[in-house]
Image (cartoon, helix red, strand yellow):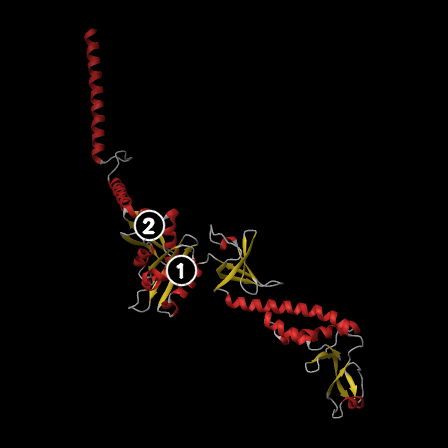
Amino acid sequence: MIKIGTALFEACEQLERERGISKEVLISSLCDAMVAAYKKHMHIKEASNIEAILDEQSGEIGVFSTKVVVNDVEDPETQIALSDAKDIDEDVELDDQVKIEVTPEQFGRIAAQSAKQVITQRIREAERNLVLQEFMDKKGTLTTGIIQRVENRNVIVNIGKTDAIMPQKEQIPGEYYKPGNRIRVFVLNVKETTKLPQVIVSHAHAEIVRELFELEVPEIEDGIVEIKSISREAGYRTKIAVWSNDPEVDSVGACIGPRGSRIQTIVGELKNEKIDIVRYSDDPVEYIVNALSPARVVSVDIIADDEFNHDAMVVVPDDQLSLAIGREGQNVRLAHKLTGWKIDIKSVSQMENNEAQNIQNNYSEDVPSDESDEPDELQQEIEEEMNQQAIDEEDFSNDVEENETSEEE
């Protein structure tokens, strides 16, 4: 047996407190390292009956070989004679298993070198598994981290036991990420790697808005108010559709809060990003009208509503057209994402011009053309009369010429 003292157990307890790696994992790693070192020292490839045992009371560790008690020994590596087994344990019987210490002399230095490598590897594996399990559970949730640095346009955020990566596409445009600042991020994905798991976080995900509303609005947390849909263009504007399961609770008012206190807190968290809270409706016409707020709507015509297409034509006053479309089409684009309907917006004057043009086109189609290839009966009769008149005039002219010739003769 090799004396290792109590320092090992103290180190195991410290690692368990600091890194969350259990003491049993470290002790198991040490025993495995002893077995590996023994096989290498004895030039043994396979030895299933070899194990290392650690006595926590005495602080000693040794390598043992498990052998079966028999009368006639055929394999000395796995069997032991009954007489020899009696010297170890007087109560042993045939077919019993006894453990025989086989720790080589001067084995401490060799075991220590092997144990260092194995324990270091096991600690890394244990940390990787702990981080993977923790953040797999946090995937799809909001967490708080500290900005560490910016590398190749990626923001590195420490979120506890590991550093997460925020790619450029998951950052808010124009946002300055200063190292040392605390930031609330959404755990987007967790990728398993050979080292620590790679955690991908987002500061621009729409679910961040959902999490903030759930934190600030008790009615949402209790299930009285339900968030039906969210569409977001991070850093600029967000639309959120809410619905109340209690007729006495106003869904929009609950999200705004007394004197706007709840919505102001959320807007401050999102760096003054505009938020439109709209009331959800099962009626697509009403839902589209609400989604296009703050623009006023004159009418909504459902053009297509099937499993493949959801198209609607919206008419707004002339002075509301730019507001309904939004800057660079942002308002109608967010309304489309929120409702799932393809929305075509026209002003009242545009619709009137289109209707007038359609009426003119329909009238032109009804009136017969003057350049028809097949003349009608009246036109045919006129042409025949004109042709006959031309023939009569030609005959009369011929008669006059004949008479004049006769008189001259």
- How far apart, in angstroms, are the residues tagged by discs 1 and 2? 24 Å
Q: Which mark is residue 111?
A: none
Q: Place residue 92 in its image quadrant.
A: bottom right
Residue behind mark 2: 324
Q: Is residue 213 above or below residue 234?
A: below
Q: Is residue 289 above or below residue 64?
A: above
Q: Place residue 282 in its image quadrant.
A: bottom left
Q: Place residue 120 in its image quadrant.
A: bottom right
Q: Residue 164, percent across and down? A: 55, 60
- Front position in the image: 409 or 158: 158
Q: Amino acid at mark 1?
A: Ile
**Image marks 1 and 2: residues in contact by CB distance under 8 Å:** no
Q: Residue at x 31, y 57 (%)?
A: 290
Q: Residue 396, percent across and down? A: 19, 18
- Give the left or right position of residue 247, taking residue 120 as reference: left
**What SS does tag 2 mark?**
helix
Q: Residue at x 20, y 34 (%)?
A: 378
Q: Is residue 39 visible?
A: no
Q: Amino acid at mark 2?
A: Ala
Q: Residues within 10 Å of mark 1 (few under 14, many from 20)?
A: many
Q: Is residue 387 above or below residue 339?
A: above
- Front position in the image: 261 or 395: 261
Q: Residue 364, percent across and down? A: 26, 39
Q: Quadrant of the C terminus?
A: top left
Q: Residue 256, percent across and down? A: 34, 61
Q: Is residue 249 visible?
A: yes
Residue behind mark 1: 266
**What SS does tag 1 mark?**
helix
- Front position in the image: 129 or 183: 183
- Give the left or right position of residue 35, taking residue 237 as reference: right
Q: Quadrant of the N terminus?
A: bottom right
